[in-house]
Amino acid sequence: MSRLHPYTLLAIAGALPAFAWILPAPSGGTWTAAVALVLTLTPGESPGLTGTGASSGWRARLIVLRTAVVTAAPFWLFLLLLHDVPTTIAIGLRITTMVASFVWLVAALAPARLVEAMVASGWSASVAYLLAATLSAVPMLKARAQRIVEAQRCRGLSPRGGVAARMRALRALALPLVLSALHEVDERALALETRGLVPGIRRTPLAPPPDSAVERAARWVLLVACLFALVRRFTVPGVS
Amino acid sequence: MSIRLLALIPVAAAISLALSAAVDAVALPLFLDTTGTILATALAGPGVGIATGIVTSAVNTLRNPTFWPFVVVQIIVALYAWVAARAGLFRGFRTAVPAGLGLGVIASVTSTPISYLVFGCTTTGGIALTTALGRALGLPPLEACFFGSFVSDFGDKAVSFALVTSVLHALPRRTAARFPWALRAIGAA
């Protein structure tokens, strides 16, 4: 599955939750949740992109399934707390489909492949940059936030006490993080300009993922099927 | 859009997602996941703010897919922050905190129908528990859902506005002047 074109992976991950919400509950949701959970057992990221080969084994696949189940489980608990059993099953299956589809997508789709596919299909390099740069900046800033927390604790900052004391502590932790991140904007802008990534310019992808006619047709079939199910849901009596 | 503003968007989105580490350290019931959107809007206007909100939701969705339907809230936050920046409401805490409280009401009104219709009000543990509290107090399901969203959003957006105000005032004037809206947002231009 991970060898599929990124747009095909996105289409599958988008279509499954759409079907879960459109098709009658609980049978529709049962089918979509089952398909999504089975998908989590398919191989992970494309070989050669991660370089580790660790994502191809059954253990890695079970980890993906476990992540989906662990992410979806609290929703079932909260639904039981707030709703009756039939409603819990109906909404729970839909949420499980959504969670499992996206957990599978994250495991199957390397961001670099998506960026290559977007650039190859004519998207602006700026749009591709936004996604890739954010994905790389988040762990970096989180690590910096952790260092700031430790540094401020060394200086005697206490995160304990009443709300006012905690708010002051929050300001002392958040302000250096945000200011240091903003000071990086100029460096990033200079780096982008140096690499010729000015808005509106077209780039040539180095290794665009192959997109076969069968996959393109499959994506259209998924879209038409979703629209057909939606129209049927609202026009045919007894389908609810 | 200039290169500087393009570079600002992923940084602001990452700020929204990384602030959770600071929140965890002080153990306050806050999300601060719209701080980057508000900051980007106050610095560079609504276009950059909306882009930041969409990117934040997209990246957050990879962590927890239930975030994606709430992308609408991020867009509304950006538009509201733009109005606040135009009015110079980031000039001090006395204007920023009430503006943030107003955003809390608008955000909870916007997120309630999404939370109710799509997720049955179970988006996060905190919201589910406050919704359950609302039900226990005798509120109908939709109103209990609004109660849950309101409790989580009201203070969160006020703190986000206060934090952005602190950042805008702590930013050196030369740095602030490089962004088109920064000085106007704090009432200095």
Image (cartoon, coloured by chain):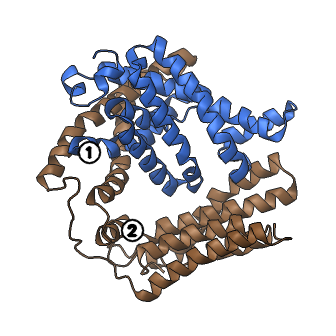
Chain colours: A brown, B blue
- Against A195, is A60 above or below? below
Query: Mark 2: which amino acid?
Result: Ala
* Quadrant of image for the C terminus of chain A: bottom right
In this rendering, position of residue A158 left or right of residue A25: left
Check if mark 2 and mark 1 are on a common chain: no
Q: Of A38 and A97, which appears nearest the observer?
A: A97
Residue B109, position as x, y percentages in the image: 65, 35
Q: Which mark is residue B1?
A: 1
Task: Tell me the element at label 2.
Answer: loop
Q: Quadrant of residue B188?
A: top left
In the image, which is nearer the foreground, mark 2 or mark 1?
1
Q: Which residue is depicted at the point 54% across and 64% down? A: A103
In this rendering, position of residue A60 left or right of residue B126: left
Q: Which residue is depicted at the point 51% across and 78% down? A: A219
How many other residues sit within 10 Å of disc 2, few (<14), some (14-19) or many (≥20)? some
Residue that mark 2 sits on: A110
In this rendering, position of residue B143 left or right of residue A37: right
How many other residues sit within 10 Å of disc 1, few (<14), some (14-19) or many (≥20)? few
In this rendering, position of residue B148 left or right of residue B162: right
Query: Mark 1: which amino acid?
Result: Met
Q: Quadrant of residue B18?
A: top left
Q: Of B72 and A143, which appears nearest the observer?
A: B72
Is residue B27 something one can see in this rendering? yes
Residue B59, position as x, y percentages in the image: 45, 53
- Against B58, is A101 above or below? below
Residue A233, position as x, y percentages in the image: 75, 69
Q: Which residue is depicted at the point 23% across and 39% down? A: A184
Is residue A41 something one can see in this rendering? no
Task: Tell me the element at label 1.
Answer: loop
